[in-house]
Image (spheres, rainbow, N blue to C red):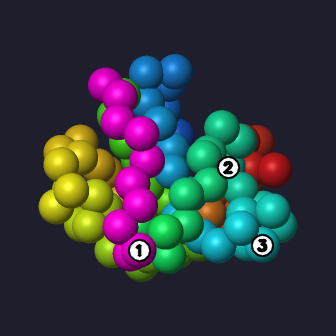
Amino acid sequence: MKRISYAEFSLLRSDSSRLLDVREPHEFAQVHVKGAEAFPLSWIQEGRVPEKDERQIFVICRSGARSQVASLILESKGFPECTNVDGGTLAAMALGDDHVE
């Protein structure tokens, strides 16, 4: 599993990448990074997976722990390009990233 900091992610993000937020819906509703798709870890643990496409997948949560678990599960399900965003949404807020809403 690949890992990068939120600062690195903010430089690499593009329309050719995909950001999955694996927190629960109520957490996502409170705050999230713009452009993120809500796809909770609980769904992934139940065997549900996001639709595959060619884009690089970055996985984020609150701090990086749940996204690490999700990345490992997704890789085992055939998603080879998963990258965990260490620090998660907390890091985005700490950096004052204007992509947080």
User: Could you tell me what secondary structure mostly forms the magenta stretch?
Assistant: loop
In the rendered structure, find residue 46 and report the number of the disc placed on it.
Answer: 1
Label 3 packing within 10 angstroms: few (<14), some (14-19), many (20+): few
In the rendered structure, which disc, 2 or 1, sits on the residue that comes first in sequence?
A: 2
Evaluate whether residue 88 shows in this view: no
The quarter of the picture where the N terminus appears is bottom left
User: Percent x, y for residue 20?
Assistant: 51, 51
Q: What kind of residue is marked 1?
A: Glu
In the rendered structure, find residue 1 and report the number of the disc placed on it.
Answer: none
Could you tell whether 16 is left or right of 96 in the image? left
Foreground tag (2 vs 1): 1
Residue underneath mark 2:
33
Of 73 and 9, which appears nearest the observer? Answer: 73
In this picture, which residue range is highlighted in magenta?
Answer: 45-54
Q: Is residue 49 magenta?
A: yes
Asked if marks 2 and 3 touch (Cβ < 8 Å), the reply is no
Q: What kind of residue is marked 3?
A: His
Could you tell whether 66 is left or right of 21 in the image? left
Residue underneath mark 3:
26
